[in-house]
């Protein structure tokens, strides 16, 4: 079933990226060093860090945030307080599992540099860091993401079109047996009660799924196209979904939107396996509160649809933009070749997805 082809008034943003949401910026630092056999603590290195910066001063102007724990097999930092208070007060970092805590420490130090009163004359700060396990390709024990890499990603964060695939936190990730990583998407739509258009953008860190489960554009691609034989991963990975919008929404409403990321993931073939840490975070860059809503369902349903569509599309784009990468011990993650995908779609009579950008 081509589940996300019917978009009902939703159109892609100019960059099909989370950065189509005004003020949202993204920065990556990619670390690729060495090759050959794993030497724990030394390499090879196939990892990185990604920073999502939601505004100019999120500590002073805290943003409404919603969190959906779809399958809680993960080590994310900062989510308990974020869920309790429903607010975001730092950029969001993505990295590999064992680099989570160093990244959180670096993020706290970054915030203290910006606001020296933190923890002295003012309250402490709640860093938000999410992770996926890249140990199939990367020397994860080496914890090669340093504080300087985090600060560089924050400094490099920018708007506009974004690199995808094997970049930043996505460098060592594998999804559905193929090379995974970072993907992004967006939709713009009219909200009548606001009397204006709004944007919802999504960024994913895709590191989950089994080859035969893969759905693309709503079709069972994994049944007809498999990656070349390689050493299987013991774990089935995780996925992190970050959603942003410029619509004024409450934490409760954003939580409901974040939950719809699971719908989009299901369209890609996700079953949320036992060992898959699947989390979705949704924030609003708008200040204040939403308008009085005589019909909240009519107001929120387009956001639900956009969240599902952009999540599925972002995963597909992560796969299609990531080329083949060899990591430690000769482990290789093959890139999903758009030409092979197009061939299967033609043979099966399936229409190519609306986001298709390859000849």
Image: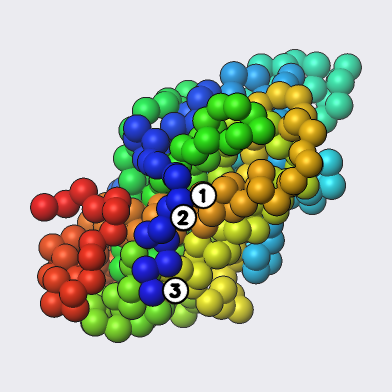
Picture disc at residue 269: 3
Left-right relation of 183 to 343: right
- Cβ atoms under marks 1 and 3 closer than 8 Å: no
Task: Read off the residue under disc 2.
Answer: 309
SS under mark 3:
loop
Please report whichever mark, 1 or 3, sits nearer to the chain's N-terminal start.
Answer: 3
Q: Quadrant of the N terminus?
A: bottom left
> Mark 1 = which residue?
306
Q: Nearer the viewer, residue 94 or 14?
A: 14
Answer with the quarter of the image where residue 216 lies: bottom left
Q: In the image, is residue 57 above or below residue 131?
A: above
Q: Are marks 2 and 1 in contact (CB under 8 Å)?
A: yes
Residue 46, given in percent of the width and then of the height, sits at 36, 54
Look at the image and tell me whether residue 135 can be seen: no
What secondary structure is marked by label 1? helix
Mark 3 surroundings within 10 Å by alpha-carbon count, few (fewer than 14), some (14 through 19), many (20 or more)? many
**For the point 66% across and 44% down, which residue is it?**
299
Answer few, some or many: residues within 10 Å of disc 1's Cα (few below 14, many 20 plus, some between 14 and 19).
Answer: many
Whether residue 303 sits left or right of residue 81 in the image: it is: left
Residue 307 or residue 138, whichever sits in front: 307
């Amino acid at each position: 079933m081509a589940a996300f082809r019917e978009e009902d008034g939703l159109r892609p943003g100019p960059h099909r990226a989370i950065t189509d949401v005004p003020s949202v910026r993204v920065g990556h630092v990619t670390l690729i060093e060495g090759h050959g056999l794993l030497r724990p603590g030394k390499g090879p290195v196939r990892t990185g860090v990604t920073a999502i910066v939601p505004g100019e001063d999120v500590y002073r102007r805290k943003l409404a945030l919603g969190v959906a724990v779809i399958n809680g097999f993960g080590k994310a930092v900062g989510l308990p307080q974020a869920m309790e208070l429903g607010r975001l007060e730092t950029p969001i970092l993505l990295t590999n599992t064992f680099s989570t805590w160093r990244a959180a420490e670096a993020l706290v130090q970054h915030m203290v540099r910006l606001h020296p009163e933190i923890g002295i004359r003012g309250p402490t700060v709640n860093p938000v860091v999410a992770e996926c396990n890249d140990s199939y390709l990367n020397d994860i024990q080496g914890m090669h993401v340093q504080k300087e890499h985090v600060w560089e990603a924050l400094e490099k964060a920018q708007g506009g079109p974004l690199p995808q695939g094997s970049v930043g936190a996505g460098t060592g990730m594998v999804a559905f047996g193929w090379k995974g990583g970072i993907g992004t998407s967006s939709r713009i739509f009219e909200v009548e009660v606001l009397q204006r258009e709004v944007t919802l953008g999504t960024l994913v860190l895709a590191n989950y799924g089994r080859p035969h489960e893969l759905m693309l554009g709503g079709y069972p691609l994994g049944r007809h196209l498999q990656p070349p034989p390689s050493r299987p991963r013991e774990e089935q990975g995780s996925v992190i979904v970050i959603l942003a919008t410029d619509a004024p929404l409450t934490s409760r409403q954003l939580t409901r939107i974040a939950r719809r990321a699971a719908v989009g993931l299901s369209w890609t073939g996700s079953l949320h396996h036992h060992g898959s840490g699947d989390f979705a975070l949704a924030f609003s860059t708008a200040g204040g509160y939403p308008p009085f809503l005589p019909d909240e369902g009519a107001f929120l349903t387009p956001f639900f649809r956009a969240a599902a569509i952009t999540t599925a599309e972002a995963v597909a784009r992560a796969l299609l933009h990531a080329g083949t990468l060899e990591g430690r011990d000769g482990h290789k993650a093959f890139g999903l070749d758009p030409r092979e995908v197009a061939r299967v779609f033609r043979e099966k009579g399936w229409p190519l997805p609306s986001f298709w950008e390859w000849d």
